[in-house]
Image (spheres, rainbow, N blue to C red):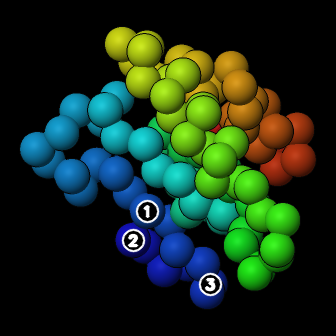
Amino acid sequence: MNPCHGVYVKDLRIIADRDIKDIILVDNSIISFAFQMENGIPIKAYMRQENDEELLFMVTFLEEVFSYPDPRIHIKKTFCLKELQNKYCGNPR
């Protein structure tokens, strides 16, 4: 994790015994997986809501993505995080 002005970016490259395509990071802060956007699955923050079903949706998505040889392709198509980043933050050079 790299602290940057009070936020943490998790760099998955530190995990040496796994192929990066086999690692998925689920977090309520998109910034946390900014280094590997294709590996990140955004989830709503849990704030003790009585009707929170986010993890039920996550189980369904993870079961679906498990069937892909490279889940990053499906994650990229589903969440379009790079496109959102470019739209709202500008295209990094």
What kind of residue is marked 3? His
Q: Residues within 10 Å of mark 2 (few under 14, many from 20)?
A: few
Q: Nearer the viewer, residue 24 or 93?
A: 24
Where in the figure is residue 52, as x and y percent of width and height? Answer: 78, 63
Inter-mark Cα distance, 3 to 1:
14 Å
Q: Quadrant of the C terminus?
A: top right
- In the picture of the structure, the residue carrying the numbered disc 3 is 5
* Cα separation between marks 2 and 1: 4 Å
User: Regarding mark 1 in the picture, which secondary structure is present there?
Assistant: loop
Evaluate if marks 2 and 1 touch, with contact meaning CB atoms under 8 Å apart: yes
Q: In the displayed structure, does residue 71 sit left or right of residue 53?
A: left
Side (left or right) of 30 relative to 74: right
Q: Nearer the viewer, residue 64 or 34?
A: 64
Where residue 25 appears, as percent x and y from the top left, is: 47, 50
Spatial separation of the CA atoms under disc 2 and disc 3: 13 Å
* Residue at the disc numbered 1: 10
Q: Which mark is residue 75?
A: none
Q: Is residue 76 above or below residue 33?
A: above
Foreground mark, 3 or 1, reads 1
Q: Earlier in the sequence, mark 2 or mark 1?
A: 2
Task: Find the residue positioned furthest to the left.
Answer: 17
Q: What residue do we see at 50% from left, 66% from top? A: 9
- Pinpoint residue 13: horizontal percent, then vertical percent: 28, 49
Crowd tier of the residue under label 1, counting other residues whose Cα lies within 10 Å: few below 14, some 14–19, many 20 or above: some
3 or 1: tag closer to the N-terminus:
3
Residue occupying the point 73% across, 69% down: 45
Choose mark 2 or mark 3, whichever is in front: 2
